Amino acid sequence: MKPTKELVLTLDSPDSPLKEMLLKETIAQEAGEEVINFVTEQVDLSRDKSIFLSSNRASLKTNRDNDIRTYIDLKTLNQQNNLNGYFRSINERLPDAGIYIGCVESYTERKERFQIASEPIVKMIWIADFFVNRVMPKLSFTKNIYSFFSRGKYNVMSKAEILGRLCYSGFEIIDHKPINNLLYFSVIKTSEPKKDKNPSYGLLFKMNRISKAGKMIGVYKVRTMHPYSEYLQDYVVRLNGYNEVGKPNHDFRLTSWGKVIRKLHLDEVPQILNVLKGDLNIVGVRPISKFGFESLPADLQKERIKYKPGCIPPNVALKMTGFDGVINAERIYLKEMEGRAFATNFKYFWKAIFNLITRKSSSA
């Protein structure tokens, strides 16, 4: 394929068939008809006044003369150095509600590419590739070595990580779709990039959760999700709602091994550190994010912040599931807590232990 030339269209005409034809021809040469269909579902190519289409990313920074409202990048992001910095530069160039469309070979597409060939040597290359590009960047004692030799390139990311990085950089997900063994996405600028200096990446990480009196605390947990997943929670909930235990349904942020760890409740073991620090109680309402807290009824929000959250939530003791079931369990628990906190927590602790041992309840 011929590399895409920088193409900046700023025709003043509200409707330009010539502009649309030129854009479609360029996209077709670079990426094919299916990508044209995806792009036209997101952007009106004949009406948007300023569209930047390029695979020369350096030109995005040097071209400052045009008011870019839509940026279409057809070069895969896997070779992009300092990915977060790149996303932030796009955020800076785009106005509010500006559109960014791009693509990446995610972990899923990469695995499928390796599995097309079944020769033993290919399988060996796949195992080596998985260790070098997936495992080494995430281990504290190997990530610096990986960064030195890769120079920040050759990124291999899950769908959740790439979408999470986009949200971290101030975008909101509009759509994503696998096409021609690449993951294409469209996002819209909704804010400035997040100011969190250390997004979750390692095996053990801290989640920001609301505690007593509305104070934010860091709750320790074993990673069961892909990196940057915390920035995708509202998107996953909007996409699929909640499941029977009150968690986001069809949550693609979960890793395959993370599902096993959750079933065994091993992901919550590090919360003992929070108990020792005095951040959590053994029993209490769930430690939830700001988004989750704001999704609750106002009266429940008011009652929840009277107490510290706990490692064992009341719905486990009461065997209540689903989003409504979890809320009802917390209402019952908080009502019983009034004036008799110790007795209530003692009762709920042993009921929860019994249910977990006999597998009569699921963790929420």
Image (tube, helix red, strand yellow):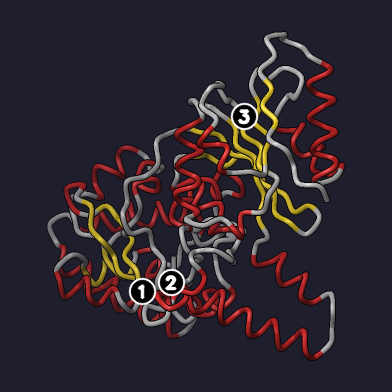
On the rendered structure, is 82 left or right of 283?
Answer: right
The circle drawn on residue 204 is 1
> 129 or 252, which is in the foreground?
129
Q: Position of residue 9 (x, y in %)?
A: 69, 22
Q: Secondary structure at mark 2?
A: loop
The answer for how far apart the CA atoms under marks 2 and 1 are is: 6 Å
Q: Position of residue 310 (x, y in %)?
A: 27, 66
| Residue depicted at 68% across the width and 35% down the height | 6
Secondary structure beneath dot 3 equals: strand
Q: Amino acid at mark 1?
A: Leu
Q: Residue visible at 14% across and 68% down?
A: 278
Q: Amino acid at mark 3?
A: Thr
N-terminal of the pair, mark 2 or mark 1, is: 1
Secondary structure at numbered mark 1: strand
State which quadrant residue 141 falls in. bottom left
Residue under pointer 3: 70
Indicate which disc, 3 or 1, sits on the residue closer to the N terminus: 3
What is the total number of numbered labels drawn onto the structure image?
A: 3
Give the camera-side residue of 25 and 41.
25
* Residues marked 2 and 1 touching at CB (< 8 Å): yes
Which circle marks residue 223 in the picture? 2
Within 10 Å of the Cα at label 2, are there few (<14), some (14-19), or many (20+) other Cα atoms? many
